[in-house]
Image (cartoon, helix red, strand yellow):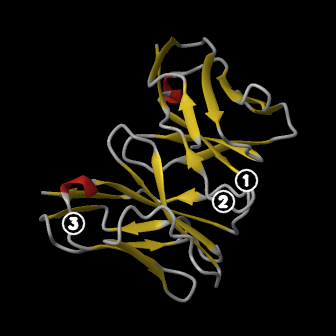
C-alpha cells in the first residue's frame, strides 16, 4: 500500500541554523509533492509545491528538493527563527487523486 | 468569507448520537475535501467533491459516515451513531479544481469529542 514517512516526529534546532526535514514515500509515483505548515489548532497552510520533473524549488528561506529515484523530498528552512516552530507536513498526489499526507514533523526552533 | 469556514469549531457529543459538521468553501472553488486528523496522526482522507461529478467516497471509514454538497457550495459531513474512535479534528478544504498541483485551502477544523 502507499506509504509516506516523515523522518522524525520532532526536530529541535538552534535559531539561525538550517532545519532539514525528510519525506520518503513507497508504492507511489506522485506527479506533485507539496509541503504544508500546521500550527496548533489550525488547519494546514500550503507552503511549496514541486513537480516530478523539478529537482529543486525555492521560496524565500524555504527550499524543497524532489528525488523520484530515491523517492524522497527534503525540506529546508535556512536561518531558522522561533516563529518557524510548527508541524510540517508533506503530501503527494497525481492525476485527480486527493492529497495523501504524511504524519508530519514537529519542528522547534530554540532561541 | 475570505477563507474556508467550518462550524462548529468544537463539538462534544454522547456516544450513539448523530452529528453534522458544516463546511463553507471559498466562493468559486469547485473542489471540496474532507479529512480527519486524530491526535498525533496525519490527515486521513475521507471524501471529495468536484463540481457535478459523483463524489469520491473511498476514504469514508464506515457506512456511518456520509457527506453531501448542496448547490456546489456548502458541504455537510454526517456521522451517525458516533463512537469514541470518531473523536478527531475534521478538516475541510477547497480548491479551484481537482487535479494534481492544486493546493487546497484548509479551514480551521471541527474538533469532535465523543464521550
Answer yes or no: is residue B21 visible: no
* Same chain letter for marks 1 and 2: yes
Where residue B26 sits: x, y (%)? 58, 71
Q: Which quadrant: the N terminus of chain A?
A: top right
Contact (Cβ within 8 Å) of mark 1 with mark 3 = no
Q: Residue furthest right?
A: A53
Element carrying mark 3: loop
Residue A101 is situated, as x and y percent measured from the top left of the image, at 55, 44
Q: Kindly indicate the quadrant of the structure image that contains residue B87.
A: bottom left
Give the percent coordinates (x, y) of residue B97. Answer: 70, 69
Q: Residues at badges 1 and 2 in contact (C-beta under 8 Å)?
A: yes
Query: Residue extending furthest bottom?
Result: B71
Q: Taking B11 as reference, is A17 left or right?
A: right
Mark seen at residue B82: 3
Q: Residue furthest front?
A: A1
**Residue at which label 1 appears:** A94
* Mark 1 Cα-neighbour bin, 10 Å: few <14, some 14–19, many ≥20: some
Q: Quadrant of residue B60?
A: bottom left
On screen, residue A26 above or below A92: above
Per the image, the residue denoted by label 2 is A97
Q: Depth check: give the residue in front, A23 or B106.
A: A23
Amino acid at each position: 500500500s502507499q506509504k509516506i514517512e516523515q523522518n522524525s516526529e520532532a526536530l529541535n534546532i538552534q535559531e539561525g541554523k538550517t532545519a532539514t526535514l525528510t519525506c520518503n514515500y513507497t508504492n507511489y509515483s506522485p506527479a506533485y509533492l507539496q509541503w504544508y505548515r500546521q500550527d496548533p489548532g489550525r488547519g494546514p497552510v500550503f507552503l511549496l509545491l514541486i513537480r516530478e520533473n523539478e529537482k529543486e524549488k525555492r521560496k524565500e528561506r524555504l527550499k524543497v528538493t524532489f528525488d523520484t529515484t530515491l523517492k524522497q523530498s527534503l525540506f529546508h528552512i535556512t536561518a531558522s527563527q522561533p516563529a518557524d516552530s510548527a508541524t510540517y507536513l508533506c503530501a503527494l498526489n497525481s492525476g485527480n487523486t486527493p492529497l495523501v499526507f504524511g504524519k508530519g514533523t514537529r519542528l522547534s526552533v530554540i532561541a | 468569507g475570505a477563507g474556508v469556514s467550518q462550524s462548529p469549531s468544537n463539538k462534544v457529543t454522547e456516544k450513539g448520537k448523530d452529528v453534522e459538521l458544516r463546511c463553507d468553501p471559498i466562493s468559486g472553488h469547485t473542489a471540496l475535501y474532507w479529512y480527519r486528523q486524530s491526535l498525533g496522526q496525519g490527515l486521513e482522507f475521507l471524501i471529495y467533491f468536484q463540481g457535478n461529478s459523483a463524489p469520491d467516497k473511498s476514504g469514508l471509514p464506515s457506512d456511518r459516515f456520509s457527506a453531501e454538497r448542496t448547490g456546489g457550495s456548502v458541504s455537510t459531513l454526517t456521522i451517525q451513531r458516533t463512537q469514541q474512535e470518531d473523536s478527531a479534528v475534521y478538516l475541510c478544504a477547497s480548491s479551484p479544481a481537482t487535479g494534481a498541483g492544486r493546493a487546497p485551502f484548509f479551514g480551521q477544523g471541527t474538533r469532535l469529542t465523543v464521550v
